Image (spheres, grey):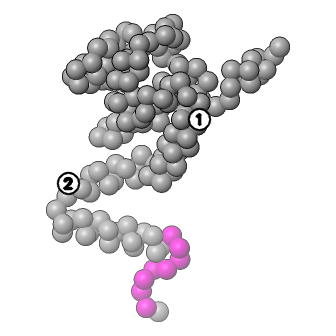
Amino acid sequence: MSSGDAEETRGSGPGSTLADRLNYLFDTVQDGRLLRPYTNGEVARAVVAAGGSLSENYLWMLRNGQKDNPTFKHLKAIADFFGVPAGYFFDDAVEGRLRDQLAALKAATGSGDIRLMASRAGELSPENRRKIVDMVDMVYRLERGHDGQDT
């Protein structure tokens, strides 16, 4: 059996193992303030702060496949942190739907540059936000061959 056959046996896509599903969440659901993936430590501390129990090291072992049988409480706490149903970790249909939804959301929100601009613009005064909108509109028209001036 080739390595490709082994992959097909386990299932296709990022959700074939618990480690794959965890890593997919880490890769896809990012810290909106810092525009980067969460760290194991950030997730573990947030779970503990919410009243759960999870260590950074245990989460690392789950993500690397060294541990693969966590308690439901652990899965629920991780799922709650990422805003997904706990079924994501063990129900292929839930995982598939969620993967599709996350891909659509990522496509709709665009690149990190767009999220960064939106985040920073939200902290500007209304007057300066209007200036930014005007500049973006001007560049948009220039890229499409419309300089906005009467000729």
Residue at left offset 37%, top offset 36%: 83
Where residue 127 sits, quadrant-wise, is bottom left
Viewer-side residue, 126 vs 59: 59
Viewer-side residue, 83 vs 118: 83
Looking at the picture, how far across and down is residue 84, in whole percent? 42, 35
Between marks 1 and 2, how big is the CA–CA gap?
40 Å
The disc labelled 1 sits on which kind of residue?
Answer: Ala
Q: Is residue 80 above or below residue 6?
A: below
Viewer-side residue, 118 vs 40: 40
**Is residue 87 part of the magenta span, yes or no?**
no
Residue at image mark 2: 123
Q: Residue furthest top?
A: 66
How many badges with numbers are in the image? Answer: 2
Looking at the picture, how far across and down is residue 124, in whole percent? 19, 58
Q: Nearer the viewer, mark 1 or mark 2?
A: 1
The disc labelled 2 sits on which kind of residue?
Answer: Glu
From which residue to which does the magenta span run?
A: 143-150
Residue 92 appears in the rendering? yes
* 54 relative position to 109: left or right: left
Residue at left offset 39%, top offset 73%: 138
Dominant SS in magenta: loop
Residue at left offset 26%, top offset 69%: 131
* 127 relative position to 75: left or right: left
Question: Local crowd at mark 2 within 10 Å, few (<14), some, or many (≥20)?
Answer: few
**Is residue 149 part of the magenta span, yes or no?**
yes
The disc, 1 or 2, on the residue closer to the chain's N-terminal end is 1
* 47 relative position to 123: left or right: right
Residue at image mark 1: 93
Q: Is residue 99 above or below residue 12?
A: below
Q: Residue furthest bottom?
A: 151
